């Protein structure tokens, strides 16, 4: 049985421990590769503004791999990062709170009440502590109504007319004999002068 590709392993076991990777009987080279990819994903999350060449320089300095290998790892990491986008946002939320709290503590030591107040306000606004917790709508408990097409008017509270189809045929025959135009009425053009209705009025030409 062929071994799974490194990208497939990374998608499922990127954060598995080394012991867990060994228990799944991955090749030693694959385990080392996963650990390297994990470290570089973490580096990318901590350095979201980094450029491709910075990633390559970092991995070359850390692991001494070839440039071909470094760029191959860059491609894999880029494919993994979208899947970690939610985790990345959580990381930045956490970092923001840490920065605000650190600012507050520094201002407190300096007895800078103005900065303390700004930091506390920012913290409260960002975490929305003044907003009541919203009750989640239990969408999973909503039952889809089983609608079915029908010609029975009783479903909307209307009593059906007896022999409706026969009555329609009878009335069509009777009215068709005395009013044949009701069966085949051709469309007629509207008798409207659109040019006169919608044209803008022309200004009077001044006389000399």
Image (spheres, rainbow, N blue to C red):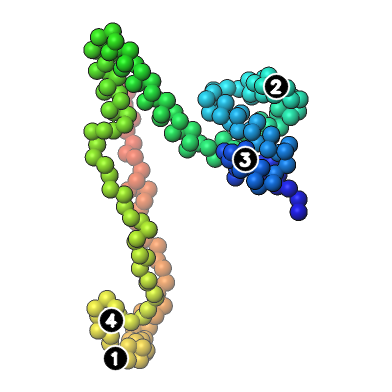
Q: CA distance from mark 1 to mark 4?
A: 13 Å
Q: Residues within 10 Å of mark 1 (few under 14, many from 20)?
A: few
Camera-side mark, 1 or 3 = 3
Q: Label 1 near label 2: C-beta < 8 Å?
A: no
Residue pointed to by mark 4: 154
Q: Residues within 10 Å of mark 2 (few under 14, many from 20)?
A: some
Residue pointed to by mark 2: 60
Which circle marks residue 44 in the picture? none
Q: CA distance from mark 2 to mark 1?
A: 87 Å
Residue pointed to by mark 3: 19
Q: CA distance from mark 2 to mark 4?
A: 77 Å
Q: Is residue 207 above or below residue 27?
A: above
Q: CA distance from mark 2 to mark 3?
A: 26 Å
Camera-side mark, 3 or 4 = 3
Q: Nearer the viewer, residue 127 or 154?
A: 127
Q: Is residue 171 above or below residue 157?
A: below
Camera-side mark, 2 or 3 = 3
Q: Label 3 near label 1: C-beta < 8 Å?
A: no
Q: Earlier in the sequence, mark 3 or mark 4?
A: 3
Q: Residue at x 35, y 56 (%)?
A: 139
């Amino acid at each position: 049985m062929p071994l799974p590709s490194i990208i497939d392993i990374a998608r499922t076991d990127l954060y598995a421990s080394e012991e867990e990777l060994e228990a799944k009987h991955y090749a030693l080279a694959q385990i080392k590769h996963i650990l390297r990819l994990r470290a570089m994903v973490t580096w990318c999350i901590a350095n979201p503004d980094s450029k491709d060449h910075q990633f390559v320089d970092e991995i070359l300095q850390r692991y001494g791999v070839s440039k071909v290998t470094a760029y191959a790892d860059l491609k894999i990491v880029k494919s993994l990062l979208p899947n970690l986008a939610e985790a990345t946002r959580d990381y930045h939320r956490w970092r923001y709170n840490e920065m605000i709290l650190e600012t507050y503590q520094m201002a407190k030591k300096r007895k800078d009440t103005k900065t303390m107040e700004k930091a506390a306000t920012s913290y409260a606004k960002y975490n929305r502590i003044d907003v009541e917790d919203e009750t989640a709508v239990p969408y999973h408990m909503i039952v889809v109504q089983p609608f079915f097409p029908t010609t029975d008017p009783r479903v909307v509270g209307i009593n059906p007319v007896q022999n409706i189809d026969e009555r329609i045929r009878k009335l069509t025959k009777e009215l068709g004999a005395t009013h044949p135009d009701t069966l085949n009425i051709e469309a007629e053009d509207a008798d409207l002068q659109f040019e006169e209705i919608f044209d803008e009025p022309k200004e009077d030409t001044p006389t000399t």
